[in-house]
Image (cartoon, helix red, strand yellow):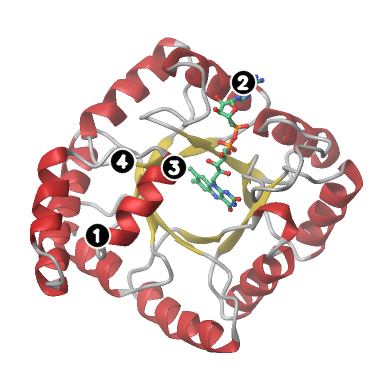
Amino acid sequence: MSQPNFSIEFFPPKTPEGAEKLRATRTKLAALNPTYFSVTFGAGGTTQQGTLDTVLEMRAEGLDAAPHLSCVGGSAESIRAILQQYKDNDIRRLVALRGDLPSGYGAGGAFRYANELVEFIRKETGDWFRIDVAAYPEMHPQARSPQDDLANFARKVAAGADGAITQYFYSADAYFQFVEQAHKLNIDVPIVAGIMPITNYTQLMRFSEMCGAEIPRWVRLKLASYGDDSASIKAFGLDVVTQLCEKLLAGGAPGLHFYSMNQAAATTAIWQRLV
Ligand code: FAD
């Protein structure tokens, strides 16, 4: 199989130890030769500086690293200043999101939805950035309906997004159906599949609850049955996620985006089985 486009996501480390660990992780993952890395951006401005610092450190090492940018709670001036910082550092790619405010924050901010952010970025910076946006094969949890969510995705593409990365999912059918529906709306940007390796049952259930990703019943039951047997969870997770990736690539997915959780082992193991 020829190497498809694949990218790897990190979050900005919160401690010096985390930063050291991430350096070791990305050295290992860089050996896989991904198309690019991306670095998340905390809602409410918590890790703005961490995002830029991590991206710049990686770029100084010769790695292609793209920042995410979430707009919730931000003013037009603050987003303009961040875009300028990215431009000043010759960053040409970003992932544009609405983000989620931590509970307790009011809505606020100049942008309500990611399509407004994409529109603003295009208005302010023209074609400087390649912009990717988020897409949800199993529907964003706050959407009124799958149709509404798809229409909202279409709005982001119409505003100027060049591509999309999906929320993670474990049903290849949900992805293929979503892509087919998007094509029917004449959305022709690449929709890269987001992949979450399975390494920890409790963490997976917690994340999936928050972001609306469905864990198939049989997968959940199997994972639960392993209890504290972390080796069996990882081995089973590796089989499940590798098979999912194989199906996606065979069915025409233009690429895979790995949510690495700043860990190298699981992404590496899946990738090595694919190539
Ligand atoms: P939007 O596209 O704005 O959609 C949000 C909700 O509003 C959806 O339910 C949508 O259907 C609805 N909606 C959109 N437009 C309208 C409209 N005009 N009228 C009515 N309803 C509308 N979060 C972070 O904080 N930092 C990150 O770095 C980050 N990276 C991510 C990367 C990827 C690939 C993905 C998939 C998610 C990421 N997230 C990140 C999480 C993301 O911020 C949340 O899922 C958030 O809740 C939605 O962001 P969005 O950009 O998809 O929002």
- Which amino acid type corresponds to the residue marked 2 in the rendered image? Arg
For marks 1 and 3, the one nearer the N-term is 1
Q: Point out the frontmost of discs 1 and 4.
A: 1
Kindly identify which residue carries mark 2. 155
Around disc 3, counting alpha carbons within 10 Å, would you say few (fewer than 14), some (14 to 19), or many (20 or more)?
Answer: some
Query: Circles 3 and 2: CB distance less than 8 Å?
Result: no
Residue 211's disc number:
3
Q: In this view, does 71 lie to the left or right of 199?
A: right
- Which amino acid type corresponds to the residue marked 3 in the rendered image? Cys
Kindly identify which residue carries mark 1. 201
What residue is rendered at 36% in x and 29% in y? Answer: 138
Residue 273 in view of the camera: yes
Around disc 1, counting alpha carbons within 10 Å, would you say few (fewer than 14), some (14 to 19), or many (20 or more)?
Answer: some
Is the CB–ligand 1 distance for label 4 below 8 Å?
A: no
What residue is rendered at 31% in x and 55% in y? Answer: 204
Q: Quadrant of residue 122?
A: top right
For marks 1 and 2, the one nearer the N-term is 2
For marks 1 and 4, the one nearer the N-term is 4
Q: Residue 65's spot in the image, x, y percent?
A: 57, 64
Kindly identify which residue carries mark 4. 169
Q: Residue 27's spot in the image, x, y percent?
A: 42, 81
Gap between marks 1 and 3, in whole Å?
15 Å
Q: Residue 203's spot in the image, x, y percent?
A: 34, 60
For marks 3 and 4, the one nearer the N-term is 4
Q: In this view, does 238 lie to the left or right of 204?
A: left
Gap between marks 1 and 2, in whole Å?
35 Å
What residue is rendered at 44% in x and 76% in y? Answer: 26
Residue 196 in view of the camera: no
